Image: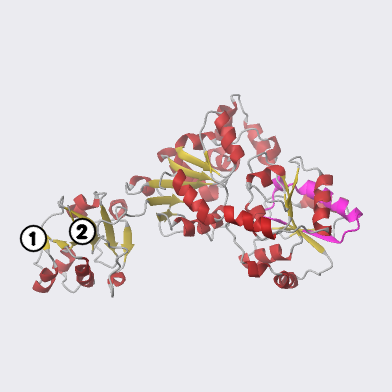
Amino acid sequence: MEHGVIIDMRCLQNNPQAPGRAVVVQARQMGLVVGIIDPDLPPLDAELLALLDRVRVNAYLPDISGVFINLAALGPDQLFIARLLLRTDIQKIAVRGGPSTTGLNGAISRVWLARYDRLTSPQAFQGQFNQAVLRSGAKHKPQIALLTPLPPARSGVADYVAVMLLALREFAEVTVFSPQGDLPVSALAHLAGRFDRVVAVIGNSAAHHGEIFELLVRYGGACICHDARLLGLYTQQRGPAGTAQVASCELGRVVSVNEIHAWGLHETQREANFLDQVAVAASPLILHARHSVDALAKRGLSARHLPFAIYRPWNDATLSAAQKQTARQRLGWPEDVKLIISLGFINPTKGIGAALQAMALLLKQNIAVRLIWVGETHCDLAPWRDLANSLDLQNTVSWLDEFIDEAAYRDYILAADAGLQLRTAGRGNISGALQDCIAAGLPSVANEDLADNLAAPEYIARVPDTLPPIAIAASLQRILTNRPATEAARAAYIAQHNMQTYAKQLCNLLDLG
């Protein structure tokens, strides 16, 4: 079989001076060039014909492979080239800026366009021809469709995926379907037929993941699940009654709607994880906490473990003592006060009560300290303020209660003397905020489950998952009075948990390695 460049010339039959003419000129550098024409349209001019090695009047070219270029991918009669669009041994490139018509519109147009491996402009072919893109018989990267939220969505998952994409695209061609992207979330990702894998990114928020979840359940595909429980997602997608039915199937007993309401108010009472349906639909289901993988295995369900990666890396130069002092000055914090931060959305699962009691114990040790919760509040703070006041912590504890930008977020980490990340929502938790502290070398206190699921280094002090205030206070006091060295352990952790390693391992789990 010969290798070459196949070009749909029909738009140049109608308009010889169309921008696609330059593409044909540049394709001449690749060797064999085959033009497809329609004999019912005006003939090509002599100059264009001279650029072609062969002319065919249909798209049946079983003896030629390589690259197919469509100069008018939204033009009429795409069925004319359907044979080429359905071939897997040909790289397909659609050129933007060709004549747009009503010959194809709506869903049918998008289905045809989805057959292409690359969408580019005529200008991309000016000057030296891109050999890396249009190389005959080339081995191409695997094609992944990724359904996910992206920034500016206020979601840690969205932030994580944005960084992951940069690393993943070293190993695969990734087409993103996102409410925040050019291609919206739709069944097209599953129906297009040109992707090697379709990957759904799922979290516990219906606002960010509801439609992606429904498509996964209907069509299957791979799934990266960022949460160890999906109670919030199910409650918003299925309603309390539907959520109760799902929980009943998981637990093998009748779960009432009242229980669902109680679990929503107090996650410590929750018994079901709501991962079964996702585990059945996904192939594979990928989780960041090994505990969650093991828990599903005990129920006869399969999942794969992929260690969580650092998605907010730090340049060593930004972690100097001078930079830390500057950050503290920007935030207006005096040098003689020890600053403890707890990062992320504020809700009842963040161990607020235990943290407040621990702060009261620290004050008894005459340590000048301040605890700030940095993030938006997703609960009623009044009971916690009342508890803080009863412990005489009015001037010691504060809640920022606002969404802050990246620069301010990093300033808080730089300025802090210690971090505090706690969870009360059962096992299998992953905390991007704790990993941010790890990546910045900020000594912190975390409960065992949270630390273990991130394989946290030694400068993360572990306390029991029951969150005893005396243990939290003692761990914080050790950090504040004798700050541990972090450089060597931080470097080792970064080497093992960088996003490039994560992306490569993800491709292996997807059988694309």
Image side of residue 141 versus residue 9, left or right? right
- Can residue 51 be seen in this snapshot? yes
Q: Which mark is residue 39?
A: 1
Question: Which corner quadrant of the image does residue 329 belong to?
Answer: bottom right
Q: How many marks?
A: 2
Residue at the disc numbered 2: 76
The amino acid beneath tag 2 is Pro
Question: What distance separates the C-alpha of mark 2 from that of mark 1?
Answer: 15 Å
Query: Measuring 13% from the left and 66% from the top, which residue is drawn there?
Result: 52
Question: Which corner quadrant of the image does residue 117 belong to?
Answer: bottom left
The amino acid beneath tag 1 is Pro
Across and down, in percent, residue 271 comes to 65, 32
Q: SS of the residue at dot 2?
A: loop
The segment highlighted magenta reads 342-371
Q: Which mark is residue 421?
A: none
Across and down, in percent, residue 471 comes to 82, 45
Q: Earlier in the sequence, mark 2 or mark 1?
A: 1
For label 1, the crowd category at 10 Å Cα-Cα, with few meaning under 14, some 14 to 19 and many 20 or more, is few
- Can residue 245 be seen in this snapshot? no
Q: SS of the residue at dot 1?
A: loop
Across and down, in percent, residue 55 comes to 11, 61
Image side of residue 311 versus residue 216, left or right? right
Residue 48 covered by magenta stretch: no
Query: Measuring 40% from the left and 40% from the top, which residue is drawn there?
Result: 219
Instruction: Give the foreground label among 2 and 1.
Output: 1
Across and down, in percent, residue 317 comes to 64, 70
Q: Is residue 393 above or below residue 265?
A: below
Q: Nearer the viewer, residue 98 or 84?
A: 84
Q: Is residue 305 above or below residue 22?
A: above
